[in-house]
Amino acid sequence: MKLSNLTGLSALLLFLAGCATTTPQAPIAFSESSLQTQPGRIGVGMTALPKVGTSLPGAFCLLCIAAARAANSALISHAETLSYENLQDVKEDVANLLTKKGANVTAIGEELNVRELPDSVTKTPGFARKDFSQWAAKYKIDKVLVIDITSLGFVRSYSAYFPTSDPKSHFIGIGYIVDLESNAYEWYHPVNVIKSTDENWDEPPKFPGLTNAYFQALELGRDSFLRPFASSVGTPASAAPTDASLARSVAREPTTAAK
């Protein structure tokens, strides 16, 4: 093998090794004491909500994808009619809970675009991968709490052409607080809700069982962002909302399509 080929192969292996050793960020619990020991104005914002859709992981080739989408076409169309319900209110709800804890809070009116921020030079776990510092002057804040919901709707796994599961509802997102001076995380909270239906799922065109599971997942995911800030706000932690109390199984008709 030529030296140039060996050099290129070595560089590729080093690059892949670097990618493989990237350490994922572990969850960081919210500490109420940080509101007193590290005071400052907290901006609470939210990224744009994703479209409600249907994911078919495992159908990789073009023909597999086409076959899977054809087999699930009714469910794909139905997902596009489902609403966010009150999910967009979660930003204001979090801001209100922090205010009740004595924090100096401002709700950021516009949708946050984290992707447009420059990459951070620090790659150490515990620090944000993006450099959030410019938001201090832009929003006149010292910290930012970001609610980033990345996927909503239904998921059904495939192996090439063949389904390996029934469809389930899902809600995927992440919440975090970044100190804009140090770019360090003060809270890091991944959310991954998967909810199956106890009923027959295959009932087109409205799929009542799966629709009910979708709204349950929506409620459970929303509550997951609120719960860290809800305990001890004039209420014992043991009395804070639980999944069981919030997962109300009420069949609902699809409302206005998500924008």
Image (cartoon, grey):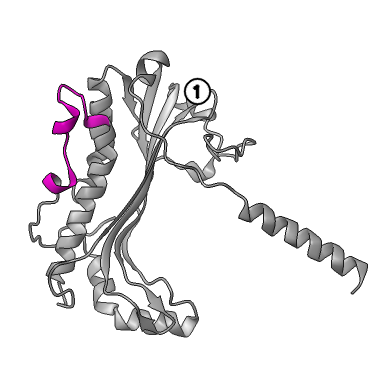
Helix, strand or loop at mark 1: helix
Asked whether 238 falls inside the magenta stretch, the response is: yes
Please state, as top left, top right, bottom left or bottom right, where the N terminus lies in the image: bottom right
Q: Nearer the viewer, residue 246 or 132?
A: 246
Classify residue 89 by image quadrant.
top left
Report whether residue 48 is seen.
Answer: no
Q: Nearer the viewer, residue 13 or 79?
A: 13
x and y percentages locating residue 134 in the rendered image: 54, 29
Q: Is residue 109 visible?
A: yes
Q: Is residue 71 left or right of residue 237?
A: right
Q: Quadrant of the C terminus?
A: bottom left
- Residue at the image position 37 percent from the left and 84 percent from the top: 162
Task: Residue at the far left: name it.
Answer: 250
Choose top left, top right, bottom left or bottom right for residue 206.
Answer: bottom left
- Compared with residue 230, is residue 154 higher up or lower down, i.e. above or below? below
Give left or right: position of 238 versus 225: left
Query: What segment carries the magenta color?
Result: 229-245
